[in-house]
Image: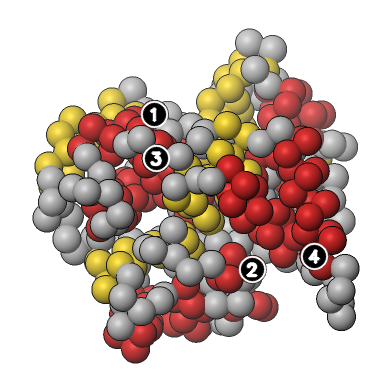
Amino acid sequence: MLVAGTNGKGSVTAIVERALRAAGCRTGRYTSPHLSAIEERFEVSGAEVAPAVLDAALERVRAAAAGLASPPTFFEVTTAAALEIFRTAQVDVAVIEVGLGGRLDATNVVEPIAGAITAIDFDHMAELGHRLEDIAREKAGIVRPGIPIVLGRNRPAARDAVAAACEAAGAHLVDADASTEVESRLVDGRTILRLRTPHAHHENVQLALRGRHQIDNAVTAVRLLEEWPALAGGIGEAAIRVGLEQTVWPARLELLHWQGQPVLLDAAHNPAGARALVSYLGDAFGRRLPLVVGIMRDKAIDEMLRVLAPAASRFVLTAADTPRAASATELSEQARRVCPDVPQVVAANPVDALARAASAGSPVVVAGSLYLVGEIRPWLS
């Protein structure tokens, strides 16, 4: 299975894999990027692969690539390694998260038995285009003749582009939002759902993943599981419930602790992700909180800061250890311009930022980049 989209594709991949495993499948899961260790990208039956297994797969990829006219990219190498790991492990089904776009992504070498496209928004515009319909057409590159393509909640321009691609290819489009009735309530920051699909009723389900935006991801995952024809009778309701209630997906509104103080980590790295984070903070806490923020230089920094500002009692601005990161000073200059009313502090590094934020209130929120979250997470318990 291939899962594409701008936001939510990792969550859908994780939910679907967990449900398939609960249904008795031997699964492979490939996601990106990793937070702390590259082995996180590759799972077989819910377990990260051992370094020796990855090393062996990479050696086979290296040997196969030796005769190429130009060397493969990092992501092409990791994708090939994932497929080699899954082949060797003889998985029943692999659930693969698309890296960037879809049409030209390395993951698109597979021939999927089904696919999903989550929320499409503006990100990676230099590669995918500056109009929503152009980005959607790139995402729809995963479409294949005769397979179900489950489309999550999207704006009309994106939906129409994906629908046109499905019609042209002869794929079966499943509009997850239109075909599912949803009722939800928030209890102690956790979402309780009642889902009614054309196939089943899922009652009183507590989502493992926090945030109202996970409702749409849950619906997309459920409809993908229900449309998959490979198991006799489909994926049962009990296995789907396990997927929704037991999925573990680090850094997606993940609550951990630092020196006894709660720290909420979130992978929000574009404006749409930032909006989802702010919505959750309003629902769960109803007050401004200290935000540790680090953003990549190629992202929409001004818009992200503007979106995050209403949730911030103060910004503690820092930079992850990567050349892609905007410096804390650059972020400070832009924050003064777009949200001058939010107090700010510049921190020398992410751990210093965590300490400064912890002195300003609780819980501390860390967001803006997976690189940033990945550096801070190992310090937490």
Which callout, 4 or 3, points at the residue further toward the start of the chain? Answer: 3
Residue under pointer 3? 25
Element assignment for label 1:
helix
Which callout, 2 or 4, points at the residue further toward the start of the chain? Answer: 4
Element assignment for label 4:
helix
Residue 289 position by quadrant: top right
Considering the image in quadrants, where does the N terminus appear? bottom left
Q: The residue under label 2 is which amino acid type? A: Ala
**Residue drawn at the location 55% of the way across and 62% of the way down:** 98
Mark 1 or 2: the one toward you: 2
Which callout, 1 or 2, points at the residue further toward the start of the chain? Answer: 2
Asked if residue 175 shows in the view, the reply is: yes
Residue under pointer 1? 246
Considering the image in quadrants, where does the C terminus appear? top right
Asked if residue 271 shows in the view, the reply is: no
- Separation (CA) of disc 4 from disc 1: 38 Å
> Disc 4 vs disc 3: Cβ atoms closer than 8 Å?
no
Q: The residue under label 3 is which amino acid type? A: Cys
Q: The residue under label 4 is which amino acid type? A: Ala
Residue density around tag 1, few if under 14, some if 14–19, many if 20 or more, within 10 Å:
some
Which callout, 4 or 1, points at the residue further toward the start of the chain? Answer: 4
Viewer-side residue, 123 vs 152: 152
Residue under pointer 2? 106
Mark 2 or 4: the one toward you: 4
Element assignment for label 2:
helix
**Residue drawn at the location 56% of the way across and 39% of the way down:** 44
| Residue 218 screen position, x and y as percent | 33, 46
> Disc 2 vs disc 3: Cβ atoms closer than 8 Å?
no
Residue under pointer 4? 64
**Residue drawn at the location 39% of the way across and 29% of the way down:** 246
